[in-house]
Amino acid sequence: MALLYVAGGAALAAGTLTLDRWLGPDGTPSWLHVGTSVAQALTTGFGSSLLFVISVVFMVRIYALQMSAEPLSARVRRRFLTDPVQRHAMGALVGSMTFVILVARAIPDPDAGGSVPQVSVAVACAVPVMAAMLVLFALRNATHWGEIGRMIRWMTDNCLRLIEVTHPPLERGHSADPPDTVPRGGDDGPGRPVLAQDSGWIQRIDLDAVLDALPPRTTVELSVHAGDFVSEGILLATVRNGSDGEPDESVCSAVRSAVVIGADPTLEQDLGYGLTLLVDIAERAGSQSSSDSTTVREVVLHLGIVLRALLLRDLPPSWRTASAGRAVVLADEQGFGDYVSTAFERIRLAGAQSPTIARCLLSTIEMLVAQLEDAGLPDRTGPLRREARLVLDSAKESLTLSADYERLCDQASPWLAPVRS
């Protein structure tokens, strides 16, 4: 991105210098006229100032990252370094300095004669003002970025958007299993395996591309899903052709290309990763070195928001079909219990000695249980009740005062029985 701004600064300098040559000394407004020595002093001073500003902004970015991102994991901190506002601010400063330097080079020496590019010098004088406004905006953005609440809300919103895309609305009697018309297993022979050619995290699986690549009466059975880590040579999918003959290599290559493997997990299709990022913040905040129960409580409440949206929708279907008998059978996705464990297990273990965190966990679980029962979905409360009992068991083993454990039992007894053993 910085190179684009450098190119933009060079292009702007070429444009203004061309305009100066076209206008000539007599075509420029008199109020823009400055002498050669003054023009050199202005552009040299502004170029040095911009270089200093770039250094200051970079130092402020690092300082803001160190001071305000303590509860965040390295994966979350990386978002600050790739934040569009920060990147554009640094790029604009570098581009501005490029412009000023090129204009300074075009100013003739006082003894050599020649005309001063008046328009270019005027623009070079305006650039530092715009750069100062940009710096103030970037600093304000860096300050707001460091607010933990904003980061938690950002990750929560991303999880909610992903749930809306991947999880269909609630439908009574809905089944996530593929119909009998979709072949599975060895119905059509062993099939042709599709192996990974690289190691890394599965970031995305383009099911539309898979279906488009299949010939008629062909089924692809995926063995992985987004968020899995695979090694080179691991089975990604199996292609089975219902007609005579074995699927050719072009089909297998298209299926392999549709499974995007990268160095890092992403939130594009992996809800578990979004929950993990939130849990990372709570785990670091609840550690003995930090002991920030307020941040842990805020994360738990937002996890409740995500789980509520998830539990009140259906799980994604385990198959996709298209015309001419083409189908994709997906690998077994995480169930509701898996998401509940991902959200609460590590927080429960990290805050086992804190009655405040235990009360917040129980309150959030109670809220979820009540909303599921009100929605007529009591069968989905099992994982939540199991997690609540684990919270009580951890508290019984870890809390120093028995009175704290008794308070937790009294809190859970109306909806979780029995709570004492």
Image (cartoon, rainbow, N blue to C red):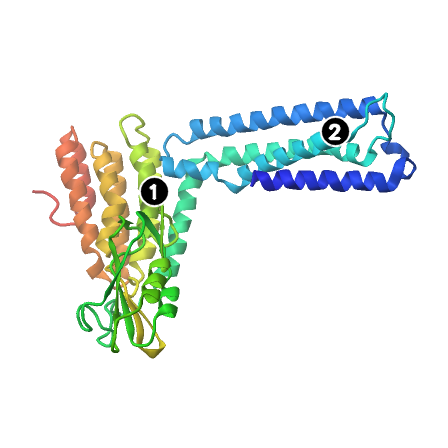
Q: Position of residue 398 (x, y in %)?
A: 15, 32
Between the C-alphas of marks 2 and 1, the distance is 52 Å
Residue at image x 29%, y 73%?
218
Q: Nearer the viewer, mark 2 or mark 1?
A: 2
Task: Inspect the image, locate mark 2, and give the three-letter code of the amino acid beneath it.
Answer: Arg
Q: Give left or right: position of 78 versus 404.
A: right
Considering the numbered disc 1 on the image, is that residue within a helix, a strand or a loop? helix
Quadrant into which the C terminus falls: top left
Residue 84, can we see it?
A: yes
Q: For mark 2, does the 10 Å Cα neighbourhood hold few (<14), some (14 to 19), or many (20 or more) residues?
A: few
- In front of the other: 176 or 214: 214
Task: Relative to 314, say whether 7 is above or below.
Answer: above
Residue at image x 27%, y 52%?
368
- In front of the other: 281 or 73: 73
Q: Where does label 1 land, which residue?
A: 278
Task: Inspect the image, locate mark 1, and give the three-letter code of the amino acid beneath it.
Answer: Leu
Q: Where does label 2 land, which residue?
A: 105
Report which quarter residue 322 is drawn in. Answer: bottom left
- In front of the other: 167 or 404: 167
Report which quarter residue 286 is drawn in. Answer: top left
Report which quarter residue 185 is drawn in. Answer: bottom left
Q: Give left or right: position of 397 versus 287.
A: left
Which one is earlier in the sequence, the residue at label 2 or at label 1?
2
Q: Position of residue 294 (x, y in %)?
A: 34, 34
* Direction right: furthest residue: 26
Residue at image x 62%, y 26%?
51
Task: Relative to 411, say whether 223 is above or below.
Answer: below
All told, the count of numbered labels is 2
Q: Give left or right: position of 106 versus 287.
A: right
- What's the mark number on residue 198? none
Residue 28, can we see it?
A: no
